[in-house]
Amino acid sequence: MNLTRRNFAIGCGAFGSSALLGAARNIADSTPFRTRLPIPRLIDAAKQGNAVSLKVISGRHAFVNGKPTRTYGYSAPILGPVIRVRRGDEITMMVENAIDTATTVHWHGLLVPGYNDGGPQRLIRPGDRWRPILKIDQPAATLWFHPHPHHDTARQIYMGLTGMIIVDDGTDAWLGLPRTFGIDDLPLILQDRSFASDGSIEYETDNLATVYGARGDTVIVNGAIAPVCKVPPSLVRLRLLNAANAQNFELRFNDQRPFHVIASDGGFLPAPVAVTELRISPSERFEVLVDFANGKPVALETGPDQEMGMFGRLAPDGSADYVPVMRFETIATKPLVKEVPARLVDPSRASQASAVARRQFIINSGVCMSRTQTGEHADMVALTGINGQSFNMERIDVETKLGTSEIWEVISAGMAHPFHIHGALFRILTIAGKQPPPHLAGWKDVVLVEDTAELLVAFNQPASREHPFMYHCHILEHEEAGLMGQYVCA
Ligand code: C2O
Ligand code: CU
C-alpha cells in the first residue's frame, strides 16, 4: 500500500503530540525585526597562511532577549566562522574539542579523502585535537561544516555547531558578482528551534521527533530570531544554508520579488534562474541574487513545510501560512553591483554513458502508517533503514571505484527524505520521473527525494574501510535512527 506523504503526515499527526506543532507556546513572538542580523566572523584562510583553528566550545547565547542559555559553537558562543578558502590551496586545519563529549567535524560538500572528512569514525575526544590537511580542489561553492559523531550529531547541531565554508576560484571577480562579505555577500544560516520559557533550547527526542525529525516553532537566521539586515540599494548575494535538523523552508519575499538562483550545493549554474518561491531542504545550499534597488523594505518569509501537510505550519496558532524569517532594509549608499549577469559558468560535463554501475537505495520509513491503521500509539516508530538495513558502523554497504561514476536510484517510501552523499557530487538525472527544474540541474550533494530520484554520482575521492564515506538522510533524527550507509572508494 502506498500512502502519499500528506496522508502519512496527517495520519501520524492524528496521534498528536502538540510538541510537534509547538502549540501556542511560542515565547519568541515579541516584536520582530529588532535584532540586527548577526554576521559570522570571516576567516580568510589565505590571509593567515592557510592555517585555520577551530575550537569546539560550550557557550552562552540569548536567542530570547535577556534569557541567555547554554549553546555550542566553533570558536564562538553559537555557530562558527565563515571560512573562505581558495581553490588550489592546502589548508592546515586544527580542531580542538573543548566540550565534554566526543565530536567530529565533517566538511559537508568539500571534496577530500575519507580520512579527512570527519565522519563518525574520526572522533575527537574531549581535550583532543585533530589536524587534517584539506587540499581544496573544486569549483567555487558554498559549503558547510558540522559534527557527525554517531548518535549525537542531531543534538550537537541543534545546540549550535554549524559553520560555513566558501570556496573561491576567482569566478566571483571575473563575473563581477557581489562579493563584499557582510555587505552585499551575506551568509544566511536558516534553522528552526523551540525554546523553553527560560529561553533554553528544547531538544526533544520522543517518537514523533524520530519520525518527523526535530522541528521548532521559531525560525532563526545566523542564530537570531526575525532579524533585520541593512543592505545597499543594489544586488545582494545571499548564501542560503538550511542547517535545520528536519524542516524544509519554503521561501518567498512578501512582495514576490524574485530570487535569482546562481549556484546550488556544488557551485555555479550555467545561468541565473529566477524563481519567486524557493524550497530549501536540510543541508541544501543556494546562492541567490536579490535586487534591492527600489529601496523598499521587504520581508523574507517561509511557508508551511509542504511535506508535512497542515502540520508543517510554523505559526503556532495556525494563524498564518507564511511567517517572517527576516527583513531587509536598504541604506542610502552608493549601489554596488546592479546587473544580474546573463551567463555564469557551465558546469563540468556529466555523461550517463560513463556510469559503470546502477544501484538502488530504498529509504524505508513507512511504519508510521500502521499506527494509523491499528490506532496504537507505542512502539510503532521504526525507520527501518536503507534497503532494509539500519546503519552499522562495522558494515561497508557499497564499494565504488575511484574515477568512475554510477547511477544511484533513491526511493523514498513513506515521506520525503533529503538524501546526501559524502565525498562526491552528483547531477540529478530525473526527479519523480521528470527532468530536474533548472535550479536543481547543477552539481549537488543533497536532494530532497519525495518519490524517486536518479542521480549520476561522480566518485573522485578515495575512502578506505577505516574511514569510509557516508550516504544518509539529512533529517538528522532519521540519520541517527539508522537511515545511513557507508561506502568505500578505491
Ligand atoms: Cu551534512 Cu553526513 O552530512
Ligand atoms: Cu529521512
Image (cartoon, grey):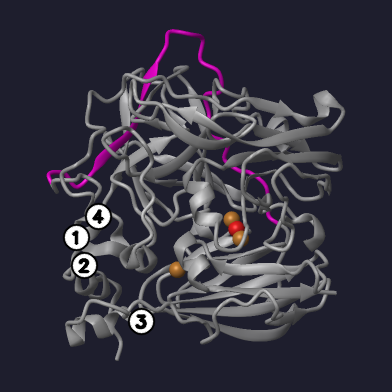
Measure the alpha-carbon separation of dots 3 and 2.
Answer: 14 Å
Sequence-wise, which precedes: disc 1 or disc 3? 1
Q: Decide: few, some or many residues near mark 3? Use Cα within 10 Å; few <14, some 14-19, many ≥20.
A: many
Quarter of the figure with the C terminus? bottom right
Q: What is the secondary structure assignment of the residue under circle 4?
A: helix
Q: Nearer the viewer, mark 4 or mark 1?
A: 4
Q: Is mark 4 within 8 Å of ligand 2?
A: no
Which image quadrant is residue 337 in?
top right
Looking at the image, tell me whether mark 4 or mark 3 is earlier in sequence order: 4
Check residue 183 for magenta coloring.
no
Q: Which residue is mark 2?
A: 13
Q: Which residue is mark 4?
A: 19
Residue receiving disc 3: 366
Q: Is residue 390 left or right of residue 215?
A: right
Judged from the image, the secondary structure of the residue bearing numbered disc 1 is helix
Where residue 127 appears, as percent x and y from the top left, is 73, 42
Q: Which callout, 1 or 3, points to the residue nearer the camera?
A: 3
Marks 4 & 1, CB-CB < 8 Å contact: no
Query: Which residue is disc 1 drawn over?
Result: 310
Q: Quadrant of ligand 1?
A: bottom right
